[in-house]
Image (cartoon, rainbow, N blue to C red):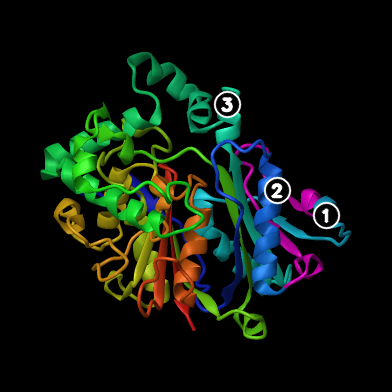
Amino acid sequence: MTADWGFPSDLDDVSGEVAIAGVGEADHTKASGRTTKQIGAQAIERALADAGLTPRDVDGIMHTPFDGQQFGADDYRAHFGTTHEMWTSTAGGGMVWAGSAPHEAALAIRAGKARTIVNVFSVAWATQRADMVGGPGEVHAAELFKQNLEVPFGWFPQPVYFATIARRHMHEYGTTPAQLGAIAVACRRHANRTPAAVLRDKPLTLEQYLASPTICDPFRKEDCCLISDGGGAYVMTSVERARDLRRPVIEVAGVGVGNSRTRTYWAQQGDFTATPQVFAAPGAFRMAGLSPADVDVLACYDPFTIVSLMQIEDMGFCKKGEGGPFVEGTTLHFDGGRLPYNTQGGMLSHAYVLGIAHVVEVVRQLRGEAAAQVRDAEIGVYGGYTGPQASTLILRRR
């Protein structure tokens, strides 16, 4: 693997400075008729209740300008009836930023700009899809490079992109459909135990997976994420202040961000079967003073099974090209697997809320509160992904 196709971001060391003191999820559903902002408000309400805080206690909010519909400071004041000034940042939300937001929050808290910061992300894509608007396909179709140099050749939408990448991974490393299926089966098993999961009542065996027809070779529908309404939020404050709140202290031990030079243009990717996690994960583990062998539970942004497999490789849990054999069997299962993975079901089976629920799940695992609880979990990792970027967030129970 060459390293000239991307680079790491240069991040200040914030290890041990900030903790996640409260987490909350909105209802994850199929089309619900709710707006993105209504969903975000519900997630924040639940995160504040979890932390034992009032709306007035929050003096910072992070979100993303991703779709122009996210819950910002004005929305916060209008919904909660507050009037106080709030530090705001658009370097938060879901995807990569669900993992990197704690770094930005730590710097703001260090500088005295805020004491208690909430990061929120939500989508109403299932509802919007009923009206044939919104969703990931529309976001990508609006990109001019894709419109002119990918779509005309049939390389669109996302299942086509990543099916091509999966086929290349199979060609280079001998990865099999059954190995991709092992990821789908593990995620579904975890979702079946999780009351909030969209597919909690739909079991999946490897035999059922292999009998399912392909929709975009080599993908079956079980290789592809859901489209959902839903969202999540988490509250951050200093580790010192978190000790005085109601929940166990879950501190940020390390953060890393990696970047691809080709941005969203996968057709131009220099290393076609890699993700920017190769640039994000080393810095995060170095900041935390840990290694992949120390991780008790892993949650990765999983739009497709192949993205899960590549991130597991690229974050150092196995060698490049050995992801297929590594994930076989029960490796990823919560109860005795070598690397418990997406223990709420991930975007494949829990809900497609773009990574924010993954961070919520890691926090619950480290507190010992998860539905598919990993025994004695102390170190949890979230891998965020957008294609052009990746983030690694390492959390530690104190």
Location of residue 194 with respect to 141 vertically, above or below? below
Question: Mark 1 to mark 2: distance in Å?
Answer: 10 Å
| Mark 3 surroundings: few (<14), some (14-19) or many (≥20) residues within 10 A | few
Residue in the image at 68% along x and 58% along y: 44
Query: Where, by quadrant of the figure, is residue 58 drawn?
Result: bottom right
Q: Residue at x 68, y 39 (%)?
A: 35
Extreme residue toward the left, this view = 174
Residue type (three-letter) at the residue carrying disc 1: Arg
Q: Is residue 248 magenta?
A: no
Q: Please say if 162 is above or below 295.
A: above
Q: Which residue is mark 2?
A: 71
Q: Is residue 3 visible?
A: no
Name the quadrant containing residue 366: bottom left
The answer to whether any part of residue 250 appears in the image is yes
Front-most of residues 4 and 340: 340
User: As drawn, is 314 to the left or to the right of 53?
Assistant: left
Q: Which residue is mark 1?
A: 77
Q: Is residue 59 magenta?
A: yes
Magenta span of residues: 53-77
Task: Write down the residue under mark 3.
Answer: 130
